[in-house]
Image (cartoon, rainbow, N blue to C red):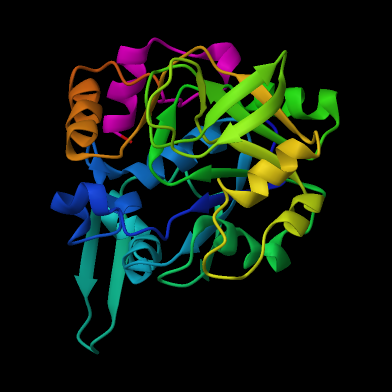
Amino acid sequence: MPKQVMKVVILCGGLGTRLREETEYRPKPMVPIGGRPILWHIMNRYAAYGFHEFILCLGYKGEMIKDYFLRYRTHTSDFTLKLGLDGEAAVEYHSPSREREWSVTFVDTGERAMTGARIKRIERFIDGETFLLTYGDGLADIDVSALLACHRRHGRIGTVTSVHPGPSRFGKLALDGDRIVQFVEKPEAHDGYISGGFFVFQREFFRYVSEDDECVLEREPLQQLTKDGQLMAYRHHGYWQCMDTYRDYQQLNEVWERGQAPWTVVAPPARRKTSRSLTQALRTA
């Protein structure tokens, strides 16, 4: 698929308190699914659709994310280390890197900042009119190209992927067709659509967020965008799962171990393999 120069912003800075069994030791985006951080799986999905430029909004234990990517080849490859007599070491890698086209910008957006504040703090790194945004803890077999096409068709400021899995920590969406008429953060119970993340925004969205640590994306920014008639829905009917709790973490790894991870893509969608062969291919990548 041809490379598309559009930034993918990923929120990676939260404390992940409901997954304390894992996040006490590492940031949630670094919690492993099938031996790779969930963050890698998210990035790999976007990259399969030609989006290779990422901005990571770091916060809690962000240095661990930086370290992982700074030593990415040694973390993910077989290699031979030759120790020279002069103290210099030479490394020969035996595994090709499919991520060689990735460009990753690491931005410290504050340890205690909320999601809206983190987005505002990366504004200077967005050099186009449109950008993609998602959370660092959700996986889906989303068709990113179809999501972007939906956004371009309606011409509004924002698009959010709507899913229908049952109660969630994500905001409830009330829809009139594909137009969102109400956005409610973390409803107690409901049986309608919810926000699954995987947003597309125009630059104008930065007017709705502030650098105040207490600015929460899912509250005033999205609610005001909704009131202005500028938030639309892309309906996703496939697989979607967030990693909010330890049980979610276990379920995602169980899906992977069964060779049935729907979010895996190692080829352009037109030539997509079965879920089982995709998972096996990623295991050997």
User: Quick check: 171 left or right of 202?
Assistant: left
Pinpoint residue 10: horizontal percent, then vertical percent.
52, 50
- Please, is residue 22 above or below residue 60 in the view? above
Which is nearer the eye, 109 or 253?
A: 109
Say whether residue 273 is magenta: yes
Image point (38%, 25%), residue name: 189
Which is nearer the eye, 128 or 274?
A: 128
User: Quick check: 259 left or right of 126?
Assistant: left
Image point (46%, 25%), residue name: 265
Q: Quadrant of residue 85?
A: bottom left
Q: Quadrant of residue 169?
A: top left
Where does the magenta region start and end?
263-284
Name the outermost residue toward the left: 21
Pinpoint residue 276: horizontal percent, then vertical percent.
30, 13
Which is nearer the eye, 226 or 124?
A: 226
Pinpoint residue 32: horizontal percent, then vertical percent.
24, 44
